[in-house]
Image (tube, rainbow, N blue to C red):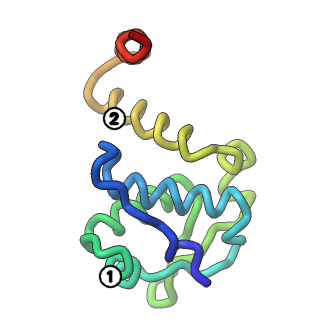
Amino acid sequence: MNPLSALEIDYTGGIPVWIQIKNRIAYLIGSGEFSAGDRLPTVRGLAVDLDVSYNTVNRAYMDLEREGYITTRKGRGTFVAERNAVGADRLSDSPVELVVDDMIRACFAAGLDADDILGIVEQRLSARRR
């Protein structure tokens, strides 16, 4: 059974669909559900299975490849990268840590610095505790 077949997209949680897909695949790789060399579904095939846009899955795959989780071989498919390519620190990332990493990247891309990011997070936590 394909471990991605159980992926349910949450359209109400505020996390972009492509990040949900990326995080799930990264989690499955880190947890050992997918092993180095395992073939992943095609972008088009996964998009159809999940009933999402091709571009959504493609964005998740591109990000996973950039971070070393997967490799694409032209004409052959997409495969889980060798463990040493991922790095030991990446293998232990939980789905929550992956979301935080994406948030930090988005904040830096928006021009915020570390102090700004911490300030926003502290404000949100304070508001949530009330």
Picture residue at 43% right of the left edge, 82% below the top: 42
Tally the numbered discs: 2
Give the x, y percent position of residue 30.
68, 56
Label 2: few (<14), some or many (≥20) within 10 Å? few
Picture residue at 56% right of the left edge, 38% below the top: 97
Secondary structure category for the residue under label 1: helix
Give the x, y percent position of residue 26.
57, 57
Looking at the picture, which amino acid does disc 1 mark? Val
| Quadrant assignment for the N terminus | bottom right
| Quadrant assignment for the C terminus | top left
Residue wearing tag 2: 106
Q: Are marks 1 and 2 in contact (CB under 8 Å)?
A: no
Give the x, y percent position of residue 112.
31, 19
Looking at the picture, which amino acid does disc 2 mark? Ala
74 relative to 17, above or below: below
Label 1: few (<14), some or many (≥20) within 10 Å? few
User: Is 93 in front, or is 113?
Assistant: 93
Work out which residue is located at the far front of the displayed protein and give it.
130
User: Is 115 in front, or is 74?
Assistant: 115
Secondary structure category for the residue under label 2: helix
Give the x, y percent position of residue 24.
52, 59
Residue wearing tag 1: 48
